[in-house]
Amino acid sequence: MTNKISLSYLRDAALKNDAISPVLYSEYGVNLGLRDPEGRGVLTGLTNISKVIGAGELNGKRVPCEGELWYRGYRIGDLITGPDNDTMEAEKIAYLLLSGEMPTEAEEMVFRSTLSYCRHLPPNFTRDVIMKAPSDDIMNNMMRSILTLASYDDLARDTSLDNVIFQCLRLIAGLPVLAAYSYHAYNYYNMEGSMYIHKPDSKLSTAENLLRMLRPDMQFTPLEAKVLDAALILHMEHGGGNNSTFTTRVVTSSGSDTYSTMAAAMASLKGPKHGGANIKVMEMMEDIRQHVRDYDDEEEITAYLDKILKREAFDGKGLIYGIGHAIYTLSDPRERIFKSYVEYLAEEKGRQEDLKLYQAVEKLAPQLLMSRAVTPKPVCPNVDFYSGFVYDMLGIPQELYTAIFAIARIVGWSAHRIEELICTEKIIRPAYMSVMKEKQ
């Protein structure tokens, strides 16, 4: 639908009346974006679910350190076996995040069986909901489906703990199905491609089922599934302060239902400042490929990266995407773990030349940013630097990149929703100071 009504009169009035001087934020001590002047998040809550460390303290000053990510008291590196082990572990780590404990063998079997049961959508849901009004915005389609699932739940508004846990499991299991089917509907109706609606296999893991549902022949290699399984684990949780998880806790605190809460979190994640970074990395790397001839020539690569920084190349924003993080300084532990999987997969797919360019940018971009004093702190590649490349090697369409992030992160959202329900009955209500001028 195209807007043919001129609203310039409202736009101009809003621009005049909604502008607030930056001086006032400083005068009243307001931390924009809930971050202090050094970029640290303003403390708004407590959590037992995870811990993110990107800097330490020395003599009262913040100093860079190697990044750490902990899930329920375990270092993330201790929870993931290497790429040469084809055991699917995302379900076990999901259990850990939700419960706070590692499952026994029997508990893990029951948990996997429950997820398998929950992967089945209501009768005719695919036809009546997912196939209606498909678009390239897969996240919007998934949000619509999540909200519609509430209509099939007689206890949709019941926020008792047992019911919320079941609803969370229903959505954790169902999101991969919603994503795959939403893409196939879009590919068929909008792109005039073929449509495949493969039912999930109860014997397969989340990663295996996602590949099975996306591919025409339903086939995948053990390494492909293992790499996607690792990607899901690394994206599952990242503290309570990231935008979508904070959204989860805010909406939960209002007493809202699980379906509305997760749709709100999805809406937050789909914002390009949050969940779309890997797509920008892919677009930037393609642009670099077109302008750099020799992937071994560090001077040529550095010169082009410098053009990007000077807003003379790529999208004119002056950003090197995938480099730098709001918390991590010297290293992002997720990126370091993921890199070994990338190397294995690049060899299987014959993409070593592409990997060489990624590795060169990974090395040179932080050096360039520091030498140009673009950032006052050390910078490192983040997990999104390689994730788009991995999804591309797996043949996953770009329309699904943010959806895969959601498929992973809904586990963390669910853990935080449960914790918010258990720990507090207070609605989250921060204060905004009015600087409005009174009119006569």
Image: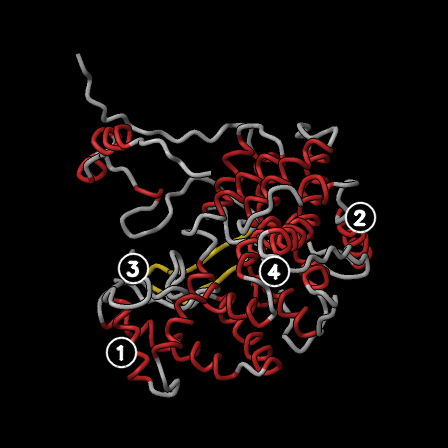
Horizontal and vertical percent position of residue 379: 34, 66
> Quadrant of the image for the C terminus?
top left
- Looking at numbered disc 3 in the image, what kind of residue is underneath it? Lys
Q: Distance between the residues labelled 4 and 3?
A: 30 Å
Q: Nearer the viewer, residue 428 or 287?
A: 287
N-terminal-most mark, 1 or 2: 2
Q: Mark 4 points at which residue?
A: 232
Please identify, in this view, whether the residue under mark 1 or under mark 4 is nearer the observer: 1
Q: Distance between the residues labelled 1 and 4?
A: 35 Å
Q: Mark 3 points at which residue?
A: 317
Q: How far apart are marks 2 and 4 (CA)?
A: 20 Å
Q: Which residue is drawn at 35% across and 29% down?
A: 431
Please identify, in this view, whether the residue under mark 1 or under mark 2 is nearer the observer: 1
| Residue 100 in view of the camera | no
Mark 3 falls on what kind of element? loop
Mark 4 falls on what kind of element? helix
N-terminal-most mark, 4 or 3: 4
Left or right: where 365 falls relative to 195 = left
Q: Mark 2 points at which residue?
A: 117
Q: Name the residue under label 1.
A: 303
